[in-house]
Every structure is written in C-alpha cells, then in structure tokens.
Amino acid sequence: MKKFATMSLQSFLLLSLFTIFSTIPIASSTPPSLSYSDHCSSTVPESNPTIPDYTIYPHLQSPFSYYHGGDGLLTTTTTTTSTTNFSQFSFNHHKYISFEPTKHIFKTNTNGVYKIEAYLHLQSTNDYYYSRHGRYFNDSRSSVKFLLNGFLSEKSGKICMVGSAKNLNFHAVLKLNYVMNPTIVDSLISGRLVSLSSSTDSNYFEPVWILGFSETRNYKYSGESGNGCDSGIDFPTDQSLSLPPRKFCSSQRRIDAVLTYKNECNSSTKKKNCTVLDDGIDYLPRVMSMDSIQCSEEERKVRFLIQFGNGSYMGYDQPFEPNSTLVAEASWDAEKSQLCIVACRVLKDDHVGNCSIRMSLRYPALWSIKNREAIVGQIWTNKTVNEAGYFNKIMFGSYENNMVGVSGLRYNYTQMERVRKSCPMNNNNPVKRKGERYPEAKSYDMRLHNMRIKDSKGKNAWGTAYPVLVGDESYEDNSMVVFSSVRDESEMEAKRSYTGPLNISYAISIYGISSLTNLASNPLNTLQISAEGVYDEETGNLCMVGCTKLSKDGQRSKTESIDCEVVVKFQYQPMNSKNGGQIKGTIKSTRKETDPLYFAQLEVSASTYYTEDARNSIWRMDLEIAMVLISNTLACVFVVLQIFYVRKNPGLLPLASLVMLVILVFGHMIPLVLNFETLFLGKRDRRRQLLRSGGWFEVNEVMVRIVTMAAFLLQFRLLQLTWSARLGGEKNQKASWVAEKKALFVSTPLYIVGFLVALFLNLRNNKSDNSMYSSYDVAATTVVHQQNSLWGDLKSYGGLVLDGFLFPQILLNMFRISGEKPLSRSFYIGTTFVRLLPHAYDLYRAHNYARKQFEESYIYANPSADYYSTAWDVGITCGGVAFAIIIYLQQRFGGRFFLPRRFREAEAVYEKVPVVSSE
C-alpha cells in the first residue's frame, strides 16, 4: 500500500512538471502591451466611465466600406489549373469590413468623451467559379474579427481603440477619423488598424487602411440638389410618375442601370470626355448601381453610394471600390417629378471632393414594346469643355422590365395589328379538347424558367420567359406596380367578364447565344426580346410579335436599332393532362434570308411545372409520409407477433428460412445504411423551390428513421433467435441445414437469372424512352441516367426480391418435407400485405398523379427502390398473394402438397418419426 502511494505521488509530480513546462512557449516573443494609455493617450485621453449611453455612434457596414493592406492578417489566395488575366473590376475578389459598436457604451467624466466597445470584422473572399481555363477556389483564412475597447471624442472626431482578434494571436490599435455632423464633403470615415506586434513576430501584419460611410441622424444635406436639375433635360410632367407618400425611401433603396453613350464613346475602351470616372480607370463603364446609405422620408432626400462596373450586371454584394465610386445626395423635385442628384468623387487623399457631377432620374409613365425602362436618367457635369473632369452627357436606364413600386404606370400596345396578321385565331370555334384546362393568363404557370432552344443546325441555348402584364394589369409577380390605362369602371367590368384571347406582354431572355450562328454577334452572349400579343386560355395558345435591341458592339448607344420582325409562338400543355408533356414553341424572323438581321427559326421547349401539380404533389407527399409510417409500424407489429408465436412454440424456430429472414433484415437495413436523405428527401432543394413545403420533411424524416430502425432491430432479433435455435445441437437440426442449403442453391441461380432478364428489359425500355426526349431535356436526362445506372437497377431488383420474400421459405418447406407451421398467419399474411400495399398505391397514383417531372418527390413506392408500372404492379401483387397462399397450404397440407401422392408419402412417413431429444 505504501509502495502504491509512493508511485502515485511520483506520477503526480511528473504530471505537474509536464503541465508546467508545456505551458511555457518556446522561443516566443513577449505579448505586446494592450494598455490603452500606451497607444491612444495622445489621440483621445482616457477618462473614467460613468453612466451607459445608447446613442447611435458611427458604424461601418458593407457595401459602404473599404479597406486595403493588412498583409499577413488575411491569407486568402486563389488557385487554379491555369493562369488567366482578369481586370481589377471583374469582382472575383471581394473585401468587406464592418465596424459595429456593442451596447457597452458609457459616458465619462470628460464632456463629449465616451468609452466604447466594438467589433471590427475584416473579410476577404474569392468567388467560387468556373471558366474555360479551369476552376478557381478559395483556400485559406479569409476572416478576422477583433474585439476592441477604447474612447470616442465628439469634439475632435476621433476614435482610438485597442484589442485582439478572437481566437487568434493578433493584437492591434484602431484609429478612426469622423465628423459628428457630416456633410457630403466630410462624410467619409477613414482610419488605420495597426499591429502591436514586432515586425519580426509571426503575428505581425501590415497596416490596414480603412474607408467607409456611416448612416447618422446628424447628417446635413447641402441643399445643392434642391436647386433643381439645372442643365438637364426637362420632360413634360405627365410623362413621369410621381412618388406617392411614404414610398420615397422604399423606391430609392437600390437602383441598377445600364449606361448609354454618344456614338464617339461607343467603345469598350475609355476615350476622352466619355467617362465619369477618374483617369486611373482604363475602361468605359457599362453599368451603374445606386445604393441608398440613408434616406429621409419627410424631407424626400437620400444619400447614395454610386458605383460603376464593366460587366453586364452588378451584384447586390458589390464591394466598395473608391476608384469607381461616387458619393451623392439627392432630393425629389415634386414639380417636375424627378430626382435631382449632386455627386462627388472619392479623392486619393481619403476625402470627398470635386462635386461637379449632376444627375437626374425619373420614372416614365408610359411603357411600350420598344421602351420598358422603369427608370431613366442622365449624368452630366457643370464644368466646361476645356476644364479638367469634363465629360459628355451620359444617358442611363434600368434593366428592361425591372419594375419599381410606383403606381400609375400605363402600357401602350403598338404591335397588335401585326399580331392579328401573324397570329390568326378563330375566336368562335377554338381548337380545344373536351375537359382540358390551360393556365390562366395571370397565373404563375405562365412563366417559363427552363426553356431549351435549338436552331436548325442542332446547336443549343437556354432561356427564360415571363409575362410583364396581362391586358392593362400587371402580372402576378409584379403586383406592386399598378397599371392604370383603363379608368372606366364599366370597361373594367367588361374586361373581367371577357373570355376570349387576352392581350399579353412578355420579356424573353436567351442565354448562351454564341452557340447559335445567326445571333452570335452579341458580346454579352444574351439576347433580350420584348414581345406582345394574345393568349387564349381556352386553347393554351400564345402568339406574339417581338422586338430586339441591336447595337454595333453590344453596348447601348443612341444609334442602337430595334428589330421588331420577330414572331414568337408558344403552345402550353393542359393542366389536367395525365401524360405531362412539354410546352413547345418557335421564335422566328419574318425577314428575308438575305437580310443581315435574319436568323433561322429557333425551336423552343420547356417542361411543364404547374402550380396545380405542385399543390397536388404536396398533398400526395403528405399522404405518402403517413403511409411510410403506417407501413413500417405494421411491419414492427407483425414481427413482434411472430416473435411471440415462436416463443410459445420454440420447436418451430429452426424451421423458418434463414435466407428469408436475411432478405427481410436487409430490406430494413439498406435505407438506414445508405444515405436515407437521398431516398427520402432526394433533390430536396429543388423540390422545396417548386413545392414550398417548409420543414415538414425534416420532422417526418426523424419519425420514419425511428420506425425503420425499430423494424430493423425486431427483424434482426427474429433472425438471431432462429440462428441460435439452428445451433442448438439437436440431431434433427441437420435436416434443416441440408434443406436450407438446397433452397439457397436453387434460389441463388434463379435470382441471378431474374436480375439479368430484368436488366435487359429495363435497358430496352430506356432505349425506347430516350428517343422521346431531346438530349437537352434536363428532366428526361435525369430520369434516363437514374434508370440506366447499374446501382439503380440493382436497388429496383432488390425491391422485387423483397416483394417475394416468401420464396425461400417455400423452397425450405419443400426440401425439408415438413408440414409444420413455422410462420404465424399474422406474420406472412401481414408482411405480404405491407410489401404489396405500395404496388396497389402505385396503381392509384398513376391514375391520379401522372406528372413525370415530380417522380423525384416520391417518398412511398419510390421507383428507384422497386419496379413500378401497371404491369409490374399487377404481376408482383398476384405473385405475392400466390406465395402467401402456397405457404398457407404448405403449413396445412405439407410442404409438397402440390406434388403427386407418391412424392408426398415420404413426407407422411417423415412426420410419423418421433422426435428424439438430446437428453
């Protein structure tokens, strides 16, 4: 005992010494001092905090903030399979910064000085994207968050703080400059984050330079924007929409626009007097975004951060780039119904200045097929031609069909005469089959999300199409805009009761047109078609005349032409068609083939995803979830009844087929071993987008998992009991093993031959199905690939074997020459019912839910886990019932009851031999 105590004491001492020495860093520098007075006393003297103060103080948030430097702090790198040069403004590399004070803010005993705590979050990200040169990805630390404490002085407009990065060994001091009552010229917040570590230390990083803008209630508008849009183009008041009360700020939250230049500026490179940007930018901007920093609803004034880009679109997470940014303030001119803007440049010395830029913006009151811009405006300067910084007037407009929340917009149909000539319709006798229903003109079903487009040479592109308005009313998705060309109530009532073809306007976008020979001149690789025509809800026929805007080099210019010699036709599928189908259509030019603007006819197809099908599928999926739970619960009940049955009759345990029990065990185990989410929630994201089913599936997934696990454990317990009984050592167990081997030798070749036959038939069916779909049909390709996969065929055949789970027991009864009753009726009849119920349900489902595009949402009677068709359902059901009847007859009249009498006599003699126990 004493020896043991001595050893324990020695072990304790050794462990203590190891712990002490392991906490001493080797060759590590001393942590820097985080004392506020050591680094900030000369900036904002330290004061004693008194009471909490919850006044809003400056904060920096993306996308209104910017930083550069900080080498060694963030180690974001981009790797790729090859080298590609991208311009600085391709925006593949983003930098974000935020400065957010916490609620730990206190007044101090020094007037105007506050003790403040804040988080400074720096992030540098590389987008994940593919290019023809390879895949680019981000591979390193890309985010650092500092917790800082310090003081703020209202009088000097300075903040000084010290702190460390969370979970990292970075220590730093932050110094910011700001103005408590800023105007447009001094609204920029600037500062530095400096490392407190030695330059030779591994935790050292280069200084971080910070620029940004903050929303503050103390901001003072200069008033220059309220003087009117001098030198701009004035439009008649009735051509522009006025902003309704309490809608000013919501309409200014985010504005995206495309720039239009004069002819001499219509180039991809920067030219003299063409661009609003500084000389440091070597390109001609194509797009512009205006983000609201803050807005005053009462004054109808707003601060903007205006950014320019060289791409075709600017994302909502656009980082703040000072060289391509303007700072602006605007006020609403109610008399002229336009927004007047004064803009300033961000100068290189971290200041805002050169506020010579002027802008105006208005909302057109009338749309047509040739003009669907929700916002139009212009940019100019008050400098003269000979002054530095002068540029020619630039026009801008929003992306077509992008509506804003302004009421009173009117639409003028100008091509209806050409529509009547190009799209003859028989209104008196429409071609309609009895009972067919087509989508309503204002329903979501009129949108085409996944059009496949093929030209005469077999080249492919893809696109989208959606209504802009129906008649004189906005389309369902654009309900925030009220078209008001129809004023008379009686006329509106007449329109509501009208059942003939309806006027309709569409926006069509075709992407990847570089693959289409006749349309490859567009460098943005996109073709936009504005179309208007008629849609007949009785026949599902949509016919329109379309217009495309063409320009010499793909950029918008004053000389761009509009080609309206385009006819677009779509034929929608009936909503109640049980065979599904595809929406078919054509886009063709009515010009002569010798015309340079002529293009060959384009064939259009799109899968039918109707909301009615989605609603029905939601109901069906709820039903299938319930059926899964019920089926698995019944399986548990029937196995429990079999276990009770063999406990009362232990002598019958060895007579059950081990092969049969193994098949049943695997039938419950496979969904648990495999990714059950794939079977139960396969393609969940896409289905949620279509069906909007929320979190119902997650809840029931857990329930189904639990019940399936219970069924598996009970089935495995029955297998274990049977196996143990076989190994009990009784002499008559030898006959059971011999019979089991014979049954296995007979069943295994039959299973293999059956799989090969089923595989051959399935491959032949898939080959015939492939001819029904184009190679570009994504939905059809998905189904074909799934059915052609060997794994999918193996799973389906496994379901077929599971349906015939009684087959090994039938063989065992024959070879063992037994007339005993190893299986309870509740077990073999009940389990057969559970296995055949999905096939009976599939017959019902095929009659009521036949839309093939929703097969991926099958939860019960999943085609990927068994064979489901009318022929298979009937055949498997008949086979399963037959097997149950055979088991019943075998257990009543003997295992060979169906053989001639001379073969059954041996069985009768066998039954007369007394059982000799091992005792």
Image (cartoon, rainbow, N blue to C red):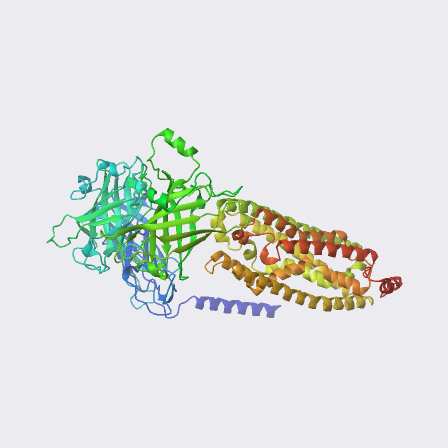
x, y (%) of residue 614? Answer: 51, 46
Horizontal side, residue 881 vs residue 780: left or right: right
Q: Is residue 489 above or below residue 412?
A: above
Which residue is at the far top? 490
Left or right of residue 892, residue 2 in this image: left
Q: Position of residue 51 (x, y in %)?
A: 32, 42
- Is there any visible trace of residue 347 in the rendered image? no
Residue 500 is situated, as x and y percent measured from the top left of the image, at 43, 38
Quarter of the image with the N terminus in it: bottom right
Q: Picture quarter containing residue 75?
A: bottom left
Left or right placement of residue 519 versus residue 884 in this view: left
Q: Nearer the viewer, residue 335 or 25?
A: 335
Of the pair 487 and 711, the residue shown nearer to us: 487
x 54%, y 69%: residue: 11
Instruction: Name the quarter where the C terminus is drawn.
Output: bottom right
Q: Can you name the residue that lies furthest to the left here?
A: 386
Q: For the point 61% across and 65% down, which residue is it? A: 760
Q: Is residue 230 above or below residue 264?
A: above
Q: Is residue 470 above or below residue 652?
A: above
Specify whether residue 234 is in view. yes
Horizontal and vertical percent position of residue 66? 28, 55
Quarter holding residue 134:
bottom left
Q: How many marks?
A: 0
Q: Is residue 557 left or right of residue 802?
A: left
